Image: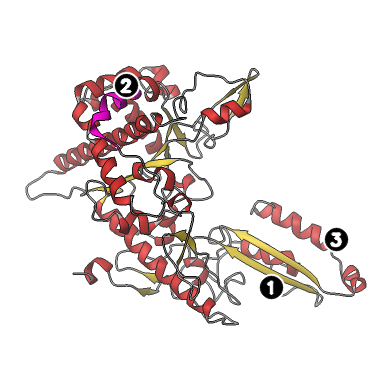
């Protein structure tokens, strides 16, 4: 296993040339096979055009050819199989004319475990007998199944403010900022109340308590049944990530409605320390808004209770006093804020492993963390226990593959699904839903070809919408458009 970086690829190519020589192949007396598995193959392995100066794809093919300008194996006795693996293959299919790594010989789609799906003929999903705890929770769960279960919908949307007749740009900016604070407030209450409810379950009493130490790894594991995390995605700009982290601190310290007036002290700002006392005061001043999340979570539980082997316990409004106490005693003192990006001042990666400190074992540092991030979360980084996502990012020219990678709330969330929420703008949710429809169309076509046992796969159908492109990674982006699914249903 090597990083997909040019210097590593060059060294590996030299190593193979030195070890697997023509003389060795001749004396071997039988073919020599090479298999390369390329993870996230729609990223560095893509050539944006035939004239591209990008060298990574050529260095990959040089592993078997010995020459970046050649694609055939360097010896007739050498056989190479290249397998590209990605969740978003749009760019791979659309570069067939100029990239030797584009899929030409076979395509395959991995099906996800869900509530239904036949083995033959294959469906996009397959029926998982273990039930919802083993389901992959993707677009079908977040965008379709809970679509009409307000107030229990897993996606909570707001309309992005547009300029009104007679309104000044300054007034519009103020309305947009007010909405941003409102969405942050609602998502924070959702996240924190959900943590408090989960902390009342058997075995979760000290799940977020960072002050306790344990004498053995086994006891620490038993005390940390799982993380409860939140993602805030404000934009691609790193400075916006730090500003959003500060806004979370301001909201936590402020009297409701006066967030913008808060001035953080140097220590809190530098260490991103949330005020537990400020959060306690907010609960006192706006208790109804915090308590309102109990019936919302219960509505989600009821809507999801029809899923196979749903394990969810009822959430009653009469439990609010216990939940309120858990917020103050178990949640507020332990919640943390992390900024994840390429800036040296940010954190490197989430930390979900139990660690040892002074001969004492402690629960994972990020068992109750709010992550503020952007592009760094698009690939290869999993947020365990992700329950709440606030997605405020927009795009001038949305690209389906790029934004699909940002949907970090997808995953195996079955054990805590009623507490999951995505807060975003209405137009962004429509994009996510359309990406889901197009993605299913692509998978369905590939799976149909697999059932037909086609020896050589024809080019796959890649769809884009009237308001977004399939990919922005290559020059030739003109592909078939799929009509808006919402318009089709009207």
Q: Nearer the viewer, mark 2 or mark 1?
A: 2
Looking at the image, the residue that sits furthest to the right is 27
Is residue 318 located in the magenta-colored stretch of the structure?
yes
| Residue occupied by mark 2 | 325
Q: Is residue 260 left or right of residue 335?
A: left
Q: Is residue 364 visible?
A: no
- Residue that badge 3 annotates: 19
Say whether residue 254 is visible.
yes
Under tag 1, what secondary structure? loop
Of callouts 1 and 3, which one flags the residue occurring earlier in the amino acid sequence?
A: 3
Q: Marks 1 and 3, Cα distance to the nearest angstrom?
A: 20 Å
Q: Quadrant of residue 55?
A: bottom right
Tell me where the magenta segment starts and ends, as one range.
315-326
Which is the main secondary structure of the residues drawn in magenta?
helix
- Check if residue 257 falls in the magenta segment: no
Q: CA distance from mark 2 to mark 3?
A: 66 Å
């Amino acid at each position: 296993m090597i990083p997909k970086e040019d210097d590593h690829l060059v060294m590996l190519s030299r190593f193979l040339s030195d070890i697997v020589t023509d003389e060795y192949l001749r004396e071997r007396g039988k073919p020599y096979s090479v298999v390369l598995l390329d993870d996230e193959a729609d990223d560095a392995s893509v050539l944006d055009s035939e004239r591209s100066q990008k060298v990574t794809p050529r260095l990959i093919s040089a592993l078997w050819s010995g020459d970046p300008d050649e694609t055939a194996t360097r010896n007739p006795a050498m056989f190479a199989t290249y397998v590209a693996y990605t969740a978003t293959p749009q760019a791979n299919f659309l570069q067939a004319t100029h990239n030797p790594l584009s899929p030409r010989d076979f395509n395959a789609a991995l099906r996800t475990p869900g509530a239904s799906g036949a083995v033959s003929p294959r469906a996009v999903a397959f029926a998982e007998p273990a039930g919802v705890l083993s389901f992959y929770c993707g677009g079908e769960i977040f965008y379709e199944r809970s679509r009409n279960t307000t107030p229990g919908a897993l996606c909570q949307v707001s309309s992005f403010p547009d300029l009104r007749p007679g309104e000044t740009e300054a007034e519009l900016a103020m309305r947009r900022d007010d909405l941003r604070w409102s969405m942050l407030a609602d998502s924070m209450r959702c996240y924190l109340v959900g943590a408090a409810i989960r902390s009342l379950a058997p075995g979760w009493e000290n799940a977020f308590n960072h002050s306790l130490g344990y004498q053995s790894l086994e006891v620490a594991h038993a005390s940390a049944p799982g993380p409860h995390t939140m993602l805030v995605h404000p934009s691609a700009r790193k400075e916006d990530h730090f500003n959003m982290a500060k806004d979370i601190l301001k909201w936590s310290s402020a009297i409701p409605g006066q967030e913008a007036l808060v001035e953080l002290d140097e220590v809190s700002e530098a260490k991103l320390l949330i005020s537990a006392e400020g959060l306690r005061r907010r609960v006192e001043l706006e208790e109804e808004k915090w308590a309102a999340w109990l019936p919302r979570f219960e509505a989600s539980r009821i809507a999801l209770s029809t899923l196979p082997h749903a394990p969810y316990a009822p959430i009653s409004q009469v439990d609010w006093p216990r939940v309120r106490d858990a917020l103050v005693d178990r949640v507020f003192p332990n919640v943390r804020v992390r900024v994840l990006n390429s800036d040296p001042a940010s954190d490197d990666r989430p930390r979900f492993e139990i660690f040892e400190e002074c001969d004492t074992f402690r629960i994972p540092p990020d068992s109750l963390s709010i992550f503020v991030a952007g592009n760094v979360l698009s690939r290869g980084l999993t947020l365990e226990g992700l329950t709440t996502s606030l997605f405020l990012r927009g795009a001038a020219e949305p690209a389906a593959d790029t934004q699909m990678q940002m949907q970090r709330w997808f995953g195996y969330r079955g054990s805590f699904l009623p507490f999951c929420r995505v807060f975003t703008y209405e137009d962004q949710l429509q994009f996510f839903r359309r990406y889901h429809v197009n993605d299913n169309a692509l998978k369905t076509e590939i799976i149909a070809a697999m059932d037909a046992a086609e020896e050589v796969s024809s080019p796959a159908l890649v769809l884009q919408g009237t308001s977004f492109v399939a990919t922005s990674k290559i020059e030739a982006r003109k592909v078939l458009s799929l009509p808006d699914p919402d318009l089709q249903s009207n």
